[in-house]
C-alpha cells in the first residue's frame, strides 16, 4: 500500500476562504428565485387572460 505525503504549503495555495454568513445570506437574497408555483400561476394567468385594444382585461 502506497502512502501519499501531503504538502502543507501546496494545500495552502489551493485554499479559498469561504464567505461569511452575512455575505452568503446577502448573495442568496439578491438572486431572483422564482419558484415553480409562481411560474405556473404566471403561465396560467397569461394563457387565460387577454388584453383588448383599449387596455381592458378580458377573460
Image (spheres, rainbow, N blue to C red):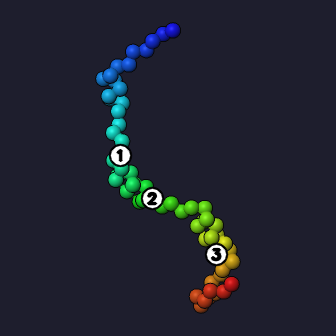
Secondary structure beneath dot 2 equals loop
Which of 37 and 53 lies nearest the eye of the viewer?
Answer: 37
Q: Which residue is mark 2?
A: 31
* Up-down relation of residue 56 to residue 19 (above or below): below
- Cβ–Cβ below 8 Å for labels 1 and 2? no
Residue with the mark numbered 1: 19
Q: Quadrant of the C terminus?
A: bottom right
Q: CA distance from mark 1 to mark 2?
A: 16 Å
Height in image: 2 above or below 19? above
Q: Is residue 5 left or right of residue 37?
A: left
Which element carries disc 3, helix, strand or loop? helix
**Residue 18 occupies quadrant:** top left
Identify the residue at the far top of this view.
1
Residue count near mark 2 (Cα–Cα under 10 Å), binned few <14, some 14–19, many ≥20: few
Dot placed on the residue nearer the N-terminal end, 1 or 3 = 1
Name the residue at 39% across, 15% down.
5
| Residue receiving disc 3 | 45
Q: State yes or no: discs 2 and 3 in contact (Cβ < 8 Å).
A: no
Q: Residues within 10 Å of mark 3 (few under 14, many from 20)?
A: few
Query: Where in the figure is residue 52, as x and y percent of width and height?
Result: 64, 87
Q: CA distance from mark 2 to mark 3?
A: 24 Å
Q: Earlier in the sequence, mark 1 or mark 2?
A: 1
The location of residue 29, given as percent across then percent down, is 42, 59
User: Is residue 27 found left or right of 9 in the rendered image?
Assistant: right
Q: Quadrant of residue 31?
A: bottom left
Q: Looking at the picture, how far across and down is residue 23, in whole percent? A: 35, 52
Amino acid at each position: 500500500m502506497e502512502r501519499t505525503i501531503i504538502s502543507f504549503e501546496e494545500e495552502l495555495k489551493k485554499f479559498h476562504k469561504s464567505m461569511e454568513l452575512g455575505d452568503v445570506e446577502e448573495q442568496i437574497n439578491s438572486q431572483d428565485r422564482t419558484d415553480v408555483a409562481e411560474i405556473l400561476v404566471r403561465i396560467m394567468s397569461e394563457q387565460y387572460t387577454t388584453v383588448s385594444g383599449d387596455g381592458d382585461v378580458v377573460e
